[in-house]
Image (cartoon, helix red, strand yellow):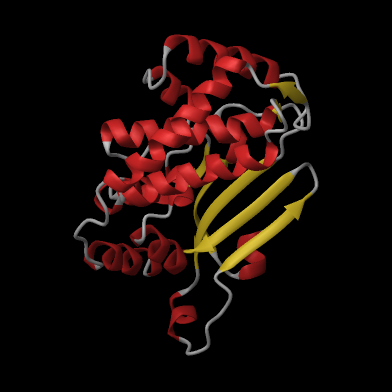
Amino acid sequence: ALEHECDIRVLYACESGSRAWGFASPDSDYDIRFIYVHPKDWYLGLNDEKDFIDRFLPGDLDLAGWDLRKTLRLFYGCNLSLNEWLDSPEIYYSADGFEQELAVMVADFFNPQKAMHHYLCMAKKVYGKHNDQGRIGIKKLFYVVRPLFCCAWIEGKGSMPPTDFQNLLDAELAPADVIEQICEVRLQKETALEGHVIELPSILQQWIILQLAHFEEAAEAQEGSRVKDWQALDQLFLDWVGK
């Protein structure tokens, strides 16, 4: 329907957010993200047109899409949300392998320092705002824990962290007792509503505080922007606009 309404062609669509990360609540909405392309003539006009589409639909469907040119410009700058889309475990549609063509270039445009700062900032902001003297929303806890695991992945491997939280847990990036406690809370989250508040287990609170302090320093030691050019992305753009 969006293709017909907006005169676009969808190239890729996936699940994002908690359902893609693997810790959705019973009342979590569906964060559907997609990439689309216009007919070639759309890109030849002088007026800058809207390059994104948002729709909030019945059934808890939250749709957000980016035009291909916008997508590739953000990809060049190592947009972490976009990288997570490309690694989503729930892909709804990929036109003729579009996702594989772009995903294979993630490593070339990945910026470890920018990525670690991104995830660290996310964890700090949520923890500072929602930790109320040891009580925290169960949903918000995972918006602290997952970014810290992402930071640990970047520190250890220097690459884009996986979207699926289980893959981060399986990588043993935290002590066994911390992972065990996280798995217990994760089981609670499967049946708890998103607004449910819990007492933050002391072992997790101590681990979070230590990790926040550690990655504050570690982020500065990460590799920054790598040498890259536009050629591969320009060619991908021309190929898909022309199809």
Residue shown at 60% from the left, 62% from the top: 3
Quadrant housing residue 172: top left
> From this viewpoint, is residue 85 visible?
no
> From this viewpoint, is residue 146 visible?
yes
Residue 119: x %, y % from top left: 47, 43
Residue 25: x %, y % from top left: 70, 28
Quadrant housing residue 185: top right
Vertical placement of residue 188 versus 87, above or below: above
Q: Nearer the viewer, residue 151 or 66?
A: 151
Vertical placement of residue 69 versus 114, above or below: below
Quadrant housing residue 175: top left
Q: Which residue is at the far bottom? A: 46
Q: Is residue 91 left or right of residue 150?
A: right
Residue shown at 46% from the left, 67% from the top: 70
**Figure quadrant of the C terminus:** bottom left
Q: How many marks?
A: 0
Q: Is residue 53 left or right of residue 150?
A: right
Q: Is residue 124 left or right of residue 28?
A: left
Residue 198: x %, y % from top left: 73, 22
Q: Nearer the viewer, residue 209 or 76?
A: 209
Q: Is residue 230 left or right of residue 183?
A: left
Residue shown at 39% from the left, 38% from the top: 215
Residue shown at 53% from the left, 35% from the top: 90
Q: Nearer the viewer, residue 68 or 228?
A: 228
